[in-house]
Image (cartoon, coloured by chain):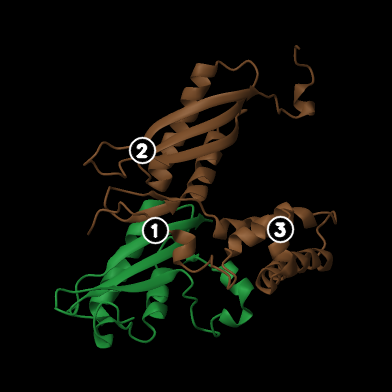
Chain colours: A brown, B green
Amino acid sequence: MTTHTDPPDTARDHGDDEHLPCGRLLSQVWDDWERGTADPHRAGCPHCRGAVSDLDALETAVRGLREETPGPRGHDAEPLARRVMDLVRLELRPGRPLPLGEPAEDLWITETVAARALRAAAETVDGVRAGSCRLTPAEAPENAPKDSGVGIRLDIHAPPGAVLPLLAERVRQRVRETADRELGMPTAAVDIRVTDLVDDTPADDQEGRIP
Amino acid sequence: MTAHGTQTTHTAPAGLAEEVARVVSAVPGVAFLKPGLAARLRSPWSCPAPGRPSTAGVRLTPFPGPGPEGEGGGWQVDVQVVALRRARTVEVARAARAAVQGHLAEVLPGRPPARVTVTVTGLV
């Protein structure tokens, strides 16, 4: 078994991203097209146009599926299309691999998947909404294993009136528990940053409350 | 596939990736191999035949052995899986690695132990 100081390049290694014959990356061409970035090359290049056409065909197919199988209220198409396209994007841009288990085990989890689990853990605390979750492999001293833990920085919205230090500590604890018990991902520092106070209690539940 | 030695030494036996895919898919806690949606989108002909597992989440690469031309080498196996949320992710990854190592030791006796990298690319 070897130490894994070189994480696998998940998307490219497994052939899900590729250089088109014109030299452009497929993921970049798709990204530029979705963002509406002006690109004279794309307009004239048959390879880029073909790649964009493929993505367009997928989106059309997904929307068609919605029309054929309307939801109970008939307006669920956009969420479905968004979920499918999110899946495609996730596959092309899964984020960097982060270590699982002990150093040198050569087991990994992609950043996007780990962040999603940790955000969900934070939201198990009443009134908390999770925002950006940044995960970074801990900086280790020279000659030390590079994968000794993952640093976590999580932004949250807290409910008004919460005692923020206590709330942050509860969120930190949930995040650590999930990283350890559910994922098995070693953690370093867990920083919780309260970026806003938001009361998202449904209006019906607020009746009778003292303002 | 001959960069590190003779073709006999370093060509993957036919169907080995599919075997690895089957073994990994049977590991408790593995939902499925990374589906490879993007590859399928690019080419509808890349879908596996009915009854044959997709190998989108399996990659085998030879590593050279100690022989003068790399003989006696083994396999580096990279596996990408989607795991079940109810299982502890690292244990699923460990089980997948052990299953691949065990299977390759059985079908390729006398080779160095396979180096197996497992990446969890999704939780369901």
Question: What residue sits right under mark 1 in the picture?
Answer: A8
Callouts 2 and 3 on one subunit:
yes
List the residue tagged with mark 2: A138
Question: Which mark, by number, is residue B117?
Answer: none
Whichever of callouts 2 and 3 sits on the residue coming sooner in the sequence is 3
> Is residue B56 at least partly visible in the picture?
yes
* Residue A88 drawn above or below residue A127: below
Task: Quote the CA–CA distance across marks 2 and 1.
Answer: 17 Å
Neighbour tally class for label 3: few under 14, some 14-19, many 20 plus, Cα within 10 Å? few
User: Cα distance, mark 2 to mark 3?
Assistant: 38 Å
Residue A53 at x, y = what percent?
A: 73, 70
Residue B107 position within the rendered picture, expressed as x and y whole percent measured from the top left: 26, 81
Q: Nearer the viewer, residue B67 or A41?
A: A41
Q: Is residue B38 above or below residue B68?
A: above
Circles 2, 3 touching at the beta carbon (< 8 Å)? no
Picture mark count = 3
User: Which of the pair A175/A148 is nearer the observer?
Assistant: A148
Do the residues at discs 2 and 1 belong to one chain? yes
**Rendering coords of residue A22 (x, y %):** 60, 70
Can you identify the residue that label 3 sits on? A39
Q: Chain of mark 3?
A: A
As measured in the structure, the alpha-carbon distance from the residue carrying label 3 to the one carrying label 1 is 31 Å
Q: Residue at x 53, y 38 (%)?
A: A133
Question: Which circle's residue, 2 or 1, is located before the other in the chain?
Answer: 1
Q: Indicate the amino acid at tag 1.
A: Pro
